[in-house]
Amino acid sequence: MEKYMLGIDIGTTNIKAALYTFSGEECFVKSATYSLHTDEFGAATQSADEIKEKTFQVIRASTAECAKSGWEISFISFSAAMHSLLAVDTKGEPISPVFTWGDRQAEPYLKDLKNKTNPSLYHRTGTPLHPMSPFVKLYGLKRSSHEMMQKADKFIGVKTFLLYQLFGVYVTDYSLANATGLFNMHTLSWDKEALEILDISENKLPNLVPTTEVLRGMKKEVALTLGLDPKIPVVIGASDGCLANLGVNAIGQGQVALSIGTSGAIRTVTDRPLTDKDERTFCYALTEDLWVIGGPVNNGGVVMDWAMNRFVESTDSDGVMDSEKNPYDQMMDQIASVQPGADQLFFHPYLVGERSPIWRPNAKGSFFGLDIHHQNQHLLRAVLEGINMNLYAVYTAISEVIGADAQEILVTGGFTQSDTWLQMIADIFGMDLVVTEVSENACLGATILGLYALGEIKDFSELNLMIPMERRIKSNESDYQFYQRHFEKYQQLSEYYLKMFDVLDE
């Protein structure tokens, strides 16, 4: 009899639940969106109650679909976005909004915090200092004397909040804890120095458990409303970034996962915690024996959307309107018409600040080398090259940290629909790209971790059978050699710009 597993991914703007067979075949995906509230002061917050409502809605839709089809869910496993922060009272009720990773309200206090800490904190926690981090957010609340610091009974993340609704316990997995900036990844405990800086105790934080922790005994009244058996095993799971590597089978030596959506990330897996002497990368737990080294970037598809809205020409060289192609395809055609290097035009894509590799929320974007002969297609190519070279800069940092180069990159995200974008990445990185058939890699990664936690698989070597490769993109050696020279100039410009960002803030 076929067995089924439900992977739930709590994202920044939506919740997804995907049902799979134990062999990894996707049966369906249910999803719902929730609001993100932003303002001119850097807020990027959400309602915890709305997230709970939408999560329960998606679970109910999933159990209803299973009941209709005669499928029984054997277990549930969770994935969640990193860096969320929520304050709750003694009854577990929210007394704050959910501060997402994109919330920058703590930015004014970042410089002061950096002066209070030394690099040893990063090397223990694996999280660079940045407003995305709950550690930095809490420091900002402390410095601003926010009443929340006194009123809160607990400071938790979104996944912890949802699990409290289901089980009545405050727990967080090592993976998400690792992304708070408060977790000592060498002792697998809350970091004493970080807590001292915030002047809070461990009692203010959830209990720490491995990513393979299995929760049982769901509240009966909640299980009934969700269409679940209260005895169903629920695997706590890990963060979305770590599980994305698992979901595309990028956990072997020499493998790197690269994803680009609105933002982007590049990650690899090692067998021990590793950090960067220059603090360019993160290190987060996948399991107690596997660690994800990587870097997130703010500037991915959001920058291409900006460029498309400003530089895409809707007519050909004869002034004839092309109604057969959408603006995105037209943009990629224009990019493909220009030689690598965009005729010595450079673009640094920091339109929304940047995380890895520079970790500068005040970073700004720029063109360099603009000449009177450059046309829109040159600007478009420079923009795409800038996004990809920024990711390549993260990759070079990762390679230095682990002491080895990758052999292949497994890619996911909407950008994989563009052959032009894929080929450019292959040429800049100088290695083959593997495009997988996985549509919801964090959900699949969560269920794979669940199989491991429940003893259904002995190790992750069985993933080769579960995650088929769709196609392979070959790198062009001559273009790679060109981009190596081009990247050196890009990096020289980066070093100059780093000195100028603070000047612009004066």
Image: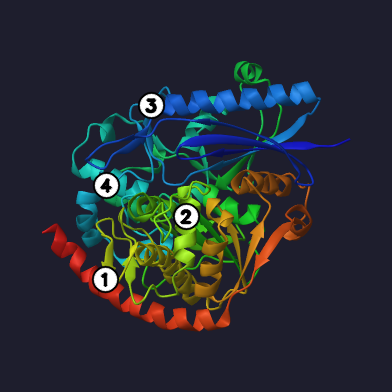
Residue 240, relative to residue 165: is it above or below? below
Q: For the point 41% across and 66% down, which residue is it? A: 381
**Camera-nearest label, 3 or 1:** 1
336 over 74 or under it: above or below: below
Horizontal relation, residue 277 to residue 498: left or right = right
Near mark 1 (Cα within 10 A), the count class, few <14, some 14-19 or many ≥20, is some
Q: Are marks 4 and 2 in contact (CB under 8 Å)?
A: no
Q: Earlier in the sequence, mark 3 or mark 1?
A: 3
273 and 279: which one is in front? 279
Q: Secondary structure at mark 4?
A: helix
Residue at the disc numbered 1: 370
In the figure, residue 25 lies in which quadrant? Answer: top right
* Quadrant including the C terminus: bottom left
Q: Secondary structure at mark 3?
A: loop
**Position above or below: 200 against 282:** above
Q: Give the mark nearer the N terminus: 1 vs 4.
A: 4
Q: Earlier in the sequence, mark 1 or mark 2?
A: 2
Going from N to C along the chain, the mark reached first, 4 or 2, is 4
Please determine whether, in this image, residue 27 is positioned above or below residue 373: above
Disc 1/disc 2 C-alpha distance (Å) = 22 Å
- Badge number at residue 139: 4
The Cα atoms of the two marked residues, 4 and 3, are separated by 19 Å
Counting labels gives 4
Does residue 493 appear in this view? yes
User: Disc 3 residue type?
Assistant: Pro
Mark 3, other Cα within 10 Å: few <14 / some 14–19 / many ≥20: some
Which mark is drawn over residue 436?
none
Circle 4 residues within 10 Å: few <14, some 14–19, many ≥20: many
Amino acid type of the residue tagged 4 in the rendering: Tyr
